[in-house]
Image (spheres, rainbow, N blue to C red):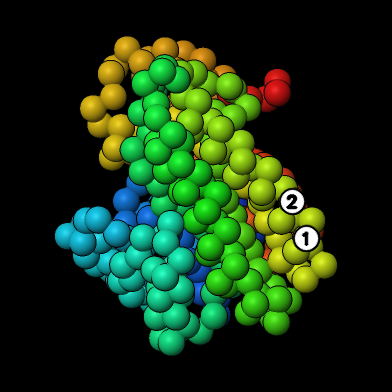
Amino acid sequence: MTKDSENSSSAAGNGCAGVSIGLQGRVALVTGNSTGLGKAIGLALGRAGAVVPVNFFNNEARAQQALAEYQAAGIRTMLVKADVTKPEDVNQMVSEIESKYGTIDILVPNATCEQPLRPIEEYDWEFYQLMLDFFVKSPYLLTRRTLPAMKQKRFGRIINITSEVFHRAVSPFSAYVAAKGAQIGWSRSMSQELAPFGITVNMVAPGWIPVERHLNDPEADKQRYFDLIPAKRWGVPEDVANTVLYLASEQSGFVTGQSIAVNGGMTAWL
């Protein structure tokens, strides 16, 4: 390997060729980051120098495995259990993190639950409410709890993980699409409210990026989606993680209220 290729490899490892993104001294809370896209995001932020706790709620054994992976990568971390749709859990989790590592600079609400595709007759309001709890209530609770310190420091990065489903009007998926639409609207409004404080609010909208929970998805469904991707390859979790890494950095300070689709061009025409 030549010296030039070594330098290029190192820059790419930081998520952006030719630009070194450092998050030393920052504390990043990525909810639901023991698996899937959340874990890839957490690892990317941690490898760039941020403290990244591992948040989980249901599967402690999996969270412990993720914790070991973060530690093996040299990331300062801790395990924090919380249902991020409950204010008491959010308050306790943030207090635990603050007591060990200081206040949170980077917030990535990512935790989710199962998202079945169903005709509207097969949904009930309880499921709609569950979607709203994860994608509107949770970002609200997390932001409300971490915002005072961000305002005091006049620095903050709030990055919501939304979805292409809103822009593509995917069906039969009305509960999830409705909640993601609400999350997008909330993020846009918050970006305007918080911009004067040096706090940016942006959105990353992944396409269908296969992770652990997609292992049993029908191959025919995967092929139909793949055939529509202009880039002619599947996205990988690191594609999303590197986009979040940029939005978490100092380099993105003049970018707010934006939604970046990470889907190989699936929504370029929208």
| Image quadrant containing the C terminus | top right
User: Residue at the location (56% across, 38% down)?
Assistant: 180
Residue 93: % across, % down: 40, 73
Residue 56: % across, % down: 31, 60
Disc 2 element: helix
Q: What is the tally of numbered marks visible in this picture?
A: 2
Instruction: Find residue 189 and name its label.
Output: 2
The outermost residue toward the right is 196
Q: Which residue is mark 1?
A: 193
Closest to the observer, 51 or 47: 51
* Residue 42 falls left or right of residue 229: left
Within 10 Å of disc 1 (Cα), the crowding (few <14, some 14-19, many 20+) is few
Disc 1 element: helix
User: Residue at the location (69% across, 81% down)?
Assistant: 153
Separation of marks 2 and 1 at Cα, in angstroms: 6 Å
In this orientation, does residue 262 appear?
A: no
User: Residue at the location (46% across, 48% down)?
Assistant: 134
Closest to the observer, 71 or 79: 79
User: Residue at the location (57% across, 58% down)?
Assistant: 140
Amino acid on which disc 2 is placed: Ser
